[in-house]
Image (spheres, rainbow, N blue to C red):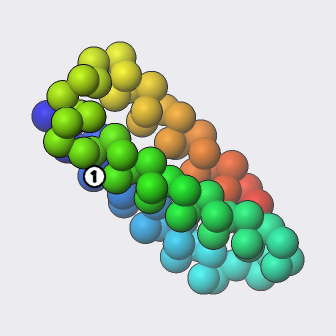
Amino acid sequence: MYENIFNDIKKMRDILIQNIGKSNADIDNINKAKKIHNELGIMLDIWTDKDNVKTLSKEDIDDIFNTSKLIIKKANDLL
């Protein structure tokens, strides 16, 4: 059930790294976007841990998804 949301976040994260690769932004902004990409990967590992995912409510999952979308949007804005 929650796997779909985490898969959607992973797909958005994959698109972000593609956008980073294609970007003509200055190196500082590219590095910031890369850091966001990496940190989001760490957070996904934490959120999807089998013990952690059991403790998440529907509201928590929705908040994670919305926050991830905003973070990725801001990273793309840097590019």
The reply to whether residue 36 is visible in this rendering is yes
Quadrant in the rendering for residue 77? bottom right
Image position, residue 27 (x, y; %)? 82, 79
In the image: residue 25, left or right of residue 42: right
Q: Residue at x 64, y 64 (%)?
A: 35
In the displayed structure, 3 sits above or below 54; it is below
Residue 49 percent coordinates (x, y) = 24, 45
Residue under label 1: 7
What x and y, as percent, mark residue 36? Answer: 62, 58
- Where residue 24 sits in the image (x, y, percent)? 77, 81
Task: Classify mark 1: residues with Cα within 10 Å, few (<14), some (14-19) or many (20+).
Answer: few
Q: Is residue 7 above or below residue 62?
A: below
Q: Quadrant location of residue 23?
A: bottom right
The residue most toward the left is 1
The quadrant in which the N terminus is found is: top left
Left or right: residue 34 versus residue 31 is left
Q: Secondary structure at mark 1?
A: helix
Residue at image location 45% in from the left, 25% down from the top: 63
Locate the C terminus and report the quarter of the image it occupies. bottom right
Check disc 1 and give the amino acid type: Asn
Q: Looking at the image, is 37 positioned above or below residue 56?
A: below
Instruction: Please determine whether, in this image, residue 27 is positioned above or below residue 46.
Output: below
